[in-house]
Amino acid sequence: MRVALDLSALRKTKWYEYAVRFFFGGVITVLAGLIGKAYGPTVGGLFLAFPAIFPAGATLVEKHERQRKHKAGIRRTARGRQAAALDAYGAALGAMGLLCFALLVWQLMPGHDPALVLFAATAAWIMVSILLWRIRKSPWWP
């Protein structure tokens, strides 16, 4: 699979699908805030690192794949579930990168320049995510 930017997908997405994503993102953010208020910002921040739109994204990926197959006359739904599972796998790899971002910010922010820490943490997030994706796509991965 080749990673690419496809802006035409923005036109294909319905307004209510954006609303569902914003709703889930808002709910997860509020829950992380409540957890942070009850147990402290460190614990709340870990919950905020959860990809907020993932629940909506996974269901929408499955729905779009199912609709595409239905238009083509294919009645089975396994392909939609497989597409959602692949999306979940990618989100898990990205979450590992976010964990690296959070750990760097948590450890370095108190004593260093905030702009430099955020830049380094963002670079680490990108590098870890890409590295994990490349390892996953390597021939020796099961």
Image (cartoon, helix red, strand yellow):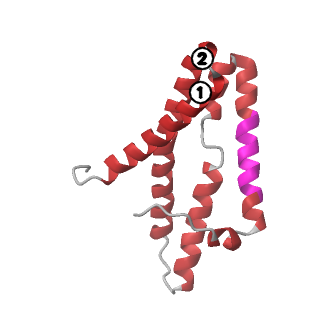
Residue 63 picture location, percent across and down: 60, 67
What residue does disc 2 label?
112
- Is residue 46 toward the left or the right of residue 90 in the image? right
What secondary structure predominates along the stretch shown in magenta?
helix
Which amino acid type is shown beneath numbered disc 2?
A: His
Q: Between 130 and 53, which is closer to the camera in this rendering?
A: 130
- State the residue at coordinates (38%, 44%): 132
Count residues near mark 1 (Cα–Cα under 10 Å), then give few for <14, some for 14-19, many for 20+: few
24 lies above or below 15? above
Count residues near mark 2 (Cα–Cα under 10 Å), then give few for <14, some for 14-19, many for 20+: few
- State the residue at coordinates (50%, 80%): 75
Which amino acid type is shown beneath numbered disc 1?
A: Leu
* Tag 2 secondary structure: loop
90 lies above or below 12? above
Estimate the spatial distance between the alpha carbons at disc 1 and disc 2, rounded to whole Å. 8 Å
Residue found at the very far left of the displayed protein: 140
State yes or no: residue 26 in magenta.
yes
Evaluate if marks 1 and 2 touch, with contact meaning CB atoms under 8 Å apart.
yes
State yes or no: residue 79 in magenta.
no
Q: Quadrant of residue 64?
A: bottom right
84 lies above or below 29? below
Q: Quadrant of the N terminus?
A: bottom left
- Is residue 5 toward the left or the right of residue 22 in the image? left
Give the residues in magenta: 19-30
Q: Between 77 and 128, which is closer to the camera in this rendering?
A: 128
What residue does disc 1 label?
116
Disc ID at residue 52: none
Residue 18 picture location, percent across and down: 74, 60
* Tag 1 secondary structure: helix
